[in-house]
């Protein structure tokens, strides 16, 4: 079974520390849907999970969209007549509306006002705003700073560039024993926001490295790309291979203190839905029905693809007060939350990668487990979880029920049953069931 290390809380605690340290490195970098900030981010991820990089030129058509011009920014500020910076991009990358066009002007407060964004209900926080597909510019600042600006005149500068360039995607490929694939996608386009996108980037990086030390059954692809245009671009470049995708997961927003939330795929009842539902049961999470709003699962689950993709977050988008403002910072993200998310991710990956159906080779009555060293020597006490798992496995392994079915019905964790199945195979009591023609998946049977 892959990722057994993530069943160990000491290991997940150490990995959460490492993920948090990576987030601290990435936090000051100004990211957007394109640009050098994304490349620097991928450089850091590459030190943990080796990435294959793809640079897709501006202007490339992607379904109903087009890869935009590349945006880079060096400096931006609003200064008073004495040259003192009242709003300074170098202090916080959220201060500039992402994709702002260049500006260098002296202007009145009245002229500046339509270009200012603040949060009256959260007066100390800087909002996050974007203008990817509109030619405009703007500054984001706290309501308190806005109230203190004065009447001007102001020197306004945005030293940015919007030029033909590239959109950057990183992909960590972990070859499996089979040609079937699983895909994990996390978005890389947000600037200084910790929970909403850095937690996803950092946890995907450590998860990929951990998985690469195992020998997974499926080939796993961890894709780091911008929201929407990134997943669309990846889909357009991989369209011929999508028939091999057995499961997919969009992950992010995993560091806040809320419970885990798994959002089901459009299709429902697929391998990822069943594996994640089990993980939510065992890690205190919730299940959400599919809806066509959210993150990149929207693209993977669009009807022309209808891929088996779900989404794992803690608090979903727009449901917490720190969402898309400067309060989503490194202090907002807790290491225990990251560690708990890793354990749940480990359970999801274990079930996706290790789900299988078996045949009981000694189905007439219960085989005698004691003489094979598989059952407690002292009679009179009830079986422990492992022995219980053996009984469930032997009883249900008629070739129709897979490990996820048995975990659902027995209430036992997937990992207990996977260990039990390995022991029963060693004892020649279980054998893998022959693959059904076409590897068809159903709610009852599940893909194997
Ligand atoms: Zn977001």
Image (cartoon, rainbow, N blue to C red):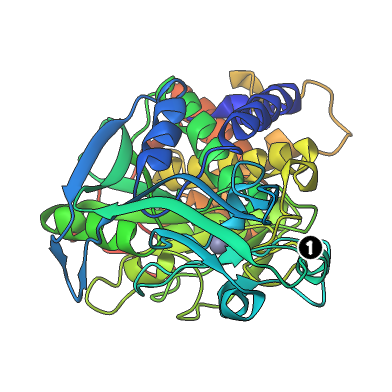
Q: Is residue 366 visible?
A: no
Residue 154, percent from left and from top: 62, 63
> Does 87 sit above or below residue 345?
below
Residue 147 placement, left or right of 178: right
Residue 103 placement, left or right of 391: left
Residue 162, percent from left and from top: 29, 55
Residue 67, percent from left and from top: 22, 61
Residue at left offset 69%, top offset 68%: 152
* Residue farthest along the right direction in this orientation: 380
The verdict on label 1 being within 8 Å of ligand 1 is: no
Q: Residues within 10 Å of mark 1 (few under 14, many from 20)?
A: some
Residue 56 placement, left or right of 417: left
Q: Is residue 90 visible?
A: yes
Residue at left offset 60%, top offset 37%: 28
Ligand 1 is located in which of the four quadrants?
Answer: bottom right
Residue 329, percent from left and from top: 72, 47
Q: Secondary structure at mark 1?
A: helix
- Disc 1 designates what residue? 145
Q: Nearer the viewer, residue 419 or 351?
A: 351
Task: Indicate the quadrant where residue 298 lies.
Answer: bottom left
């Amino acid at each position: 079974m892959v990722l057994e290390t993530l069943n160990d809380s000491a290991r997940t605690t150490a990995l959460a520390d490492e993920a948090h340290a990576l987030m601290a490195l990435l936090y000051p970098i100004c990211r957007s849907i394109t640009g050098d900030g994304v490349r620097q981010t991928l450089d850091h991820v590459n030190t943990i999970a080796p990435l294959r990089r793809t640079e897709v030129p501006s202007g490339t058509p992607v379904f109903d969209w087009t890869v935009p011009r590349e945006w880079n920014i060096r400096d931006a500020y609003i200064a008073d007549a004495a040259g003192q910076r009242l709003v300074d991009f170098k202090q916080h990358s959220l201060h500039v509306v992402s994709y702002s066009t260049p500006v260098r002007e002296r202007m009145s407060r009245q002229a500046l006002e339509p270009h200012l964004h603040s949060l009256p209900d959260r007066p100390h926080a800087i909002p996050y705003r974007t203008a990817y597909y509109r030619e405009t510019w703007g500054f984001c600042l706290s309501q308190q700073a806005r109230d203190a600006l004065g009447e001007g005149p102001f020197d306004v500068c945005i030293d940015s560039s919007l030029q033909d360039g590239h959109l950057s995607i990183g992909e960590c490929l972990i070859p499996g024993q089979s040609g079937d694939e699983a895909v994990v996608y996390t978005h890389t386009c947000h600037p200084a926001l910790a929970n909403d996108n850095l937690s996803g980037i950092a946890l995907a990086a450590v998860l990929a490295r951990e998985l690469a030390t195992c020998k997974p059954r499926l080939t796993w692809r961890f894709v780091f790309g911008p929201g929407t245009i990134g997943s669309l671009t990846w889909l357009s470049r991989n369209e011929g291979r999508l028939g091999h995708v057995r499961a997919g997961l969009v992950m992010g927003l995993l560091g806040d203190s809320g419970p885990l939330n798994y959002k089901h795929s459009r299709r429902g009842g697929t391998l990822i839905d069943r594996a994640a539902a089990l993980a939510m049961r065992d890690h205190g999470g919730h299940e959400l029905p599919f809806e066509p709003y959210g993150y990149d699962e929207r693209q993977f689950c669009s009807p022309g693809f209808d891929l088996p993709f779900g989404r794992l977050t803690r608090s979903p988008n727009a449901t917490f007060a720190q969402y898309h403002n400067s309060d989503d910072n490194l202090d907002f993200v807790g290491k225990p939350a990251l560690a708990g998310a890793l354990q749940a991710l480990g359970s999801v990956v274990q079930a996706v990668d290790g789900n299988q159906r078996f045949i009981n080779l000694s189905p007439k009555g219960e085989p005698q487990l004691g003489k094979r060293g598989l059952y407690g020597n002292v009679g009179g006490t009830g079986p422990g979880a492992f022995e219980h798992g053996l009984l469930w496995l032997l009883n249900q392994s008629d070739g129709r029920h897979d490990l996820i079915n048995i975990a659902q019905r027995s209430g036992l964790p997937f990992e207990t049953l996977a260990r039990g199945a390995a022991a029963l195979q060693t004892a020649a009591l279980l054998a893998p069931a022959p693959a059904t023609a076409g590897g068809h998946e159903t709610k009852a049977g599940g893909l194997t």
